[in-house]
Amino acid sequence: MAAELCVSRGLVTRLSAQRLPRRHLSHGTQVMCQSDSPQAAFFSPVSKVLLPPDAFHGKVAFITGGGTGIGKAMTTAFSSLGAECVIASRKVDVLKKTAEEISSKTGNKVHAVQCDVRDPTSVSNAVAQLIDVAGHPSVIINNAAGNFISPSERLSANAWRTITDIVLNGTAYVTLEIGKQLIKAKKGAAFLAITTVYAESGSGFVTPSASAKAGVEALCKSLTAEWGRYGMRFNVIQPGPVKTKGAFSRLDPTGEFEKIMIQRIPCGRLGTVEEIANLATYLCSDYASWVNGAVVRIDGGEFVFMAGEMNNLHKVTQEEWNMMEEMIRKTKGS
């Protein structure tokens, strides 16, 4: 369970350094992600911003789904690093509240633009407003998403369309509209998409999301090859489980799966929004100017743990290993 498990996600600029200790960029996720696993102590999350305070000074960042979750955390991080941010989603009241909150902390402008990524006209209007209030963006993050768990035989055509329209079509509409404007203006940019670890493997019970996210990754790889000549980069982050209220309410409504998830993560804990935000700022920064067409998994090792056929042998005790070793030694022939 990844991607939209990860919908949620700082923070110190020159202007805010006196007002805000260089400590937490959290929206409560650290508490939500606490774990009893002993190994988790070796992998404590760091909630400070990674890059220098002026890393995005003079740059504009456009973030879909920027009002909550990962989008809010990424907006906070980019704003703290000097960017003028424009956040977009359907719920303009939530956007405005988030924009005011982040701007008051970082001292940098954060604009709210209403946009339904499923509607090409709405996207076109939002991009025009983005350019009008802040100029052409140098960072574009496709973070807007939707998901829910369901047996595939229960899916209606409308359920399928709802997810694929937001995730795949929405990402395409935003990317193509902004890309065309950048080409016209002869300006480069860094694009980033937030997908999920199961975009690579597929996953039952989230078939529309898995299919749409895989399409998003194909879109980014394709445009990497085609639009590099225009000064554009395209990268992808595949988050593992990062607990947020909005995501887990749809993907783990009973709360039964959280402990199971932690058990299959070698680092012994869920991820934090700050970790996603730090990776996002790096990939969109000039420090990563040669990182292009990359798909970066950040999941505490969950994917490889689930993929390894023998990995469940971690449940075997030392006494059982001793017994099996003796049995194996006595085995002769093939």
Image (cartoon, helix red, strand yellow):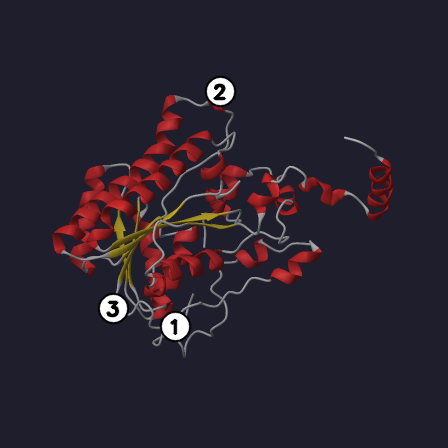
Q: Is residue 245 left or right of residue 326?
A: left
Task: Residue 220: give x, y in percent of width and height.
Answer: 32, 44
Q: Which residue is mark 2?
A: 153
Cα separation between marks 1 and 2: 50 Å
Q: Residue under label 3, please give it.
A: 58
Residue 156 position, x and y percent, is: 41, 22
Q: Position of residue 318 (x, y in %)?
A: 83, 48
Q: Earlier in the sequence, mark 3 or mark 2?
A: 3
Amino acid tagged 2: Glu
Q: Who's the residue at 83% across and 43% down the image?
A: 325
The residue that mark 1 highlights is: 52
- Answer with mark 1 or mark 2, whichever residue precedes in sequence: 1
**Badge 1 amino acid:** Pro
Q: CA distance from mark 3 to mark 2?
A: 50 Å
Which is more toward the observer, 215 or 158? 215
Quadrant of the image containing the C terminus: top right
The residue that appears at 61% across and 60% down in the rendered structure is 43
Q: Helix, strand or loop at disc 2?
A: helix
Q: CA distance from mark 1 to mark 3?
A: 14 Å
